[in-house]
Image (spheres, rainbow, N blue to C red):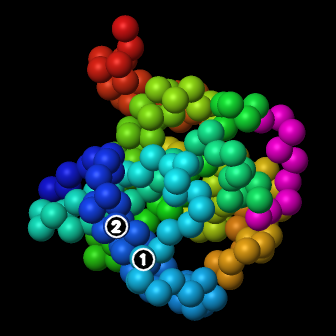
Amino acid sequence: MNFTFLEVCDKELLERVFAFRYKILLETYPEYLEVSGYSDAKEHDKYDNYSVHFAALDDDGEVCATVRLIHHSPIGYPTENSMAFDNSMFKRDKLGEMSRIFVDTKYRNIQTTKKIIQAVKTFMYIKMMKLGIEYTYGSLEESFLRLLRIYKMNYNTLGKKQKYEHADVGMRYPSILYTERLGADNPEIIDIYRSNYDA
């Protein structure tokens, strides 16, 4: 199976990303969708306007994975707006949040998940470096936190496990990923960045 990884730059593909997010949430958190009341079967929120969106397409051109990077958001970030922890140590102009990391159920196996997460790491590291983002929030379930660490996305927890305030999506940890640490743990990503973007 081959995948095409790309930044979402047109409205039609973005609408497909929202539809894919709805599909995944319907499978995993139907209660959240029921409360949210999306009438168009597309999941989107106020943070999408301040986000860079990424998608993976399968051989049939269908969206099979997504992630977004919220940055320079004047309305704050989902994790800090919905969870309790000390965020005083983070500079606002260096801060972002990575969320909606979704992979289609049929591709959730060791080989394909690793391939997709590797692309996510590469894309996000390059984008964070270009935007000057030094750290990104995440509100992560314990099992997903462990999985990301296996794939060398070493988030640090910022507080106790708690309920995400505005949605019924289970208990989560407020977490932070340092861009410098992401690069140090994945030196091949630094090489890609330097060979393409470092003057």
Look at the magenta stretch and give its main secondary structure.
loop
Element at badge 2? helix
Quadrant in which residue 165 is drawn: bottom right
What amino acid is at disc 1?
A: Lys
- The reply to whether the C-beta atoms of the residues labelled 2 and 1 are less than 8 Å apart is yes
**Position of the N terminus by quadrant:** bottom left
From the image, tell me which residue sits under label 1.
Answer: 42
From the image, tell me which residue sits under label 2.
Answer: 15
Quadrant in which residue 159 is drawn: bottom right
Q: Is residue 179 above or below residue 105?
A: above
How crowded pointer 1 is (Cα within 10 Å; few <14, some 14-19, many 20+) is rated as: some
Identify which residue is drawn at 50% across, 69% down. 44
Q: Is residue 163 above or below residue 187?
A: below
Marks 2/1: CA–CA distance: 7 Å
Q: Is residue 165 above or below residue 137?
A: below
Q: Position of residue 157 (x, y in %)?
A: 74, 51
Q: Is residue 50 magenta?
A: no
Identify which residue is drawn at 63% across, 88% down. 35
Residues 88 and 194: in front is 88
**Residue 24: in sight, yes or no?**
no
Tally of marks = 2
Identify which residue is drawn at 77% across, 35% down. 90
What amino acid is at disc 2?
A: Glu
Q: Residue at the far top: name it.
A: 199
Q: Is residue 89 magenta?
A: yes
Q: Position of residue 109 (x, y in %)?
A: 33, 68
Quadrant in which residue 106 is drawn: bottom left
- Lower sequence index among marks 2 and 1: 2
**Residue 172: in sight, yes or no?**
yes
Element at badge 1? loop
Identify which residue is drawn at 68% across, 31% down. 93
Q: Magenta segment, which residues?
A: 82-90
